[in-house]
Structures are given as C-alpha cells and as structure tokens.
Image (cartoon, grey):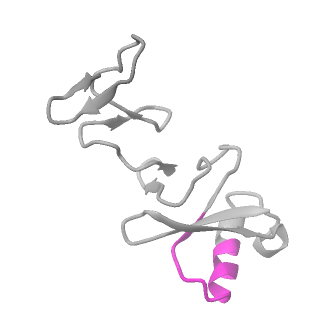
Amino acid sequence: MALFAQLDENNKVIQTIVVSDDDCGGGVFPGSEPIGQEFISSLGLGENWLQFSPDASYRRYVSIGSIYITIGDFFTQPQPFPSWTIDANYDWQPPIPKPEEDGYWSWNEAQQRWVR
C-alpha cells in the first residue's frame, strides 16, 4: 500500500488516500511517486498529490490540515503561532521553552511568554 496526500494551493493537506502497490510501481519511494500520481490523475481525483510514509522513513505521516514544507520536503502541523519556528525534527518550537513546573501552561503570543 502507498499513501498519498492531496495539497491545496497553500500546500495544506486536503485529503489522503491509499493506492495499491500494483498501481504505483511497487510502492517503493521515490520511484513509486510519479507512477502513483499518474494513476491518481487517471481516476480524475485532481492534481497535486505527494506520497508519504506511515513510518516516517520519508515525509512523515500526515493528516488533513497538515502543511507541506517545500524546502526540506516534509509535512508538519500548521504553525501554531507566528513566533514559533521549526526544529531539526520538523516540530514547532516556541521562542521560550515551556516551563517544567506542574500546571497548565498556554502560550501568550502577544506577551511572548508562557502563562498559567
């Protein structure tokens, strides 16, 4: 099985599908991607499909609403706040680490700090 995500004009995942390995050249990435894209197109399911991996061996697993980052060729969740940046593991990080103290903390973007 090969997994594909369809992107909108803003590189946001709008749907995901499973394609048989037989319909995408054996399912082995990266060679399977263009074959799978051609197959999906032949079904009339639209354009802008990218293959992704359930085990994160390439392009980590995605869900509806995930964002594709062209530079780096990866998927991630939408940026939670404008001040947060992507780390080496493709996870969003705040400019100030979350306090380790017990309790409920939320990020206050206007104040650029964690608040209880």
Q: Specify whether 107 is left or right of 26.
A: left
Residue at 82 percent across and 65 percent down: it is 26
Residue at 43 percent across and 63 percent down: it is 12
Q: Quadrant of residue 46?
A: bottom right
In-front residue for pair 108/103: 103
In-front residue for pair 86/62: 62
Q: Quadrant of residue 114?
A: top left
Q: Is residue 100 above or below residue 4?
A: above
Tell me residue 30's x, y (percent). 67, 58
| Magenta residue check for 92 | no
Residue at 60 percent across and 47 percent down: it is 60
Query: What number of labels is visible?
Result: 0
Tell me residue 83's x, y (percent). 24, 37
| Magenta residue check for 40 | yes
Q: Is residue 71 above or below residue 86?
A: below
Give the residue furthest to the top: 101
Tell me residue 85's x, y (percent). 33, 36
Q: Specify whether 111 is left or right of 22.
A: left
Residue range corresponding to the magenta coloring: 35-50
Tell me residue 102's x, y (percent). 42, 13
In-front residue for pair 66/57: 66
Q: Specify whether 85 is left or right of 57.
A: left
Image quadrant where one finds the N terminus:
bottom right
Image quadrant where one finds the C terminus:
top left
Residue at 21 percent across and 36 percent down: it is 109
In-front residue for pair 17/58: 17
Q: Is residue 50 above or below residue 89?
A: below
Q: Quadrant of residue 44?
A: bottom right
